Image (tube, rainbow, N blue to C red):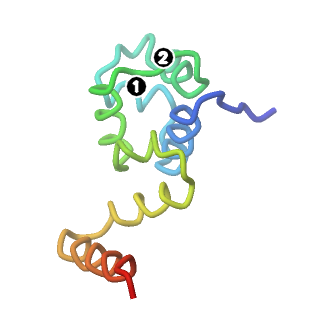
Amino acid sequence: MVKTSTSLFGARMRTARIAAGLPQDRLGVLIGLDEQCSSARISRYEGGVHEPPFRMAEQIAAALRVPVAYFYCPDETLARLLLLAYCLPEAERERLLEMAQTMTEPS
């Protein structure tokens, strides 16, 4: 049986954690949670039972190497763009921004 999250944050967090190849307990330890409760706490976040404070969300994002905005972005296409842009070097992000600005300018 596949678990589904009731929250956008939880679903995105689970997706990023699985993509990073980290079990729940390991992610919890990476962000400073006690080893004894880390798996349960991460499970509650992913399941939508609780949502972490923003500072902890930042730590989770850093551990999973995703932008924290990815967890909150309601638009799936924009969320995917965030992930792609996040992986680019700064100079390439600037190029991407310039291209996007050109695309949105009136003809």
Q: State the residue position of label 2.
A: 41
Dot 1 lies on which element? helix
Residue at 56% x, 28% y is: 46
Q: Which of 106 and 18 is in front in this view?
A: 106
Q: From the image, which quarter does the C terminus lie in?
A: bottom left
**What percent of the width, then of the height, locates residue 47?**
61, 24
User: Which amino acid type is marked by label 1?
Assistant: Gly
Q: In this view, does 105 lie above or below 15?
A: below
- Would residue 104 be found to the left or right of residue 13 on screen? left
Q: From the image, which quarter does the N terminus lie in?
A: top right
Residue at 55% x, 18% y is: 44
Density class for disc 2 (Cα within 10 Å; few <14, some 14-19, many ≥20) is many
**What percent of the width, then of the height, locates residue 11?**
59, 37
**What percent of the width, then of the height, locates residue 40?**
53, 15
Residues tagged 1 and 2 counted as in contact (Cβ below 8 A): yes
Q: First in sequence, mark 1 or 2: give its number.
A: 1
Q: Is residue 72 above or below residue 84?
A: above
Q: Quadrant of residue 102?
A: bottom left
Q: How many labels does the image show?
A: 2
Number of the label disc, if any, that sits on residue 37: none
Number of the label disc, if any, that sits on residue 28: 1
Residue at 51% x, 16% y is: 50
Residue furthest top as drawn: 36
Residue at 48% x, 59% y is: 78
User: Which amino acid type is marked by label 2?
Assistant: Arg
Dot 2 lies on which element? helix
Q: Is residue 15 above or below residue 10?
A: below
Q: Which of 103 and 6 is in front in this view?
A: 103
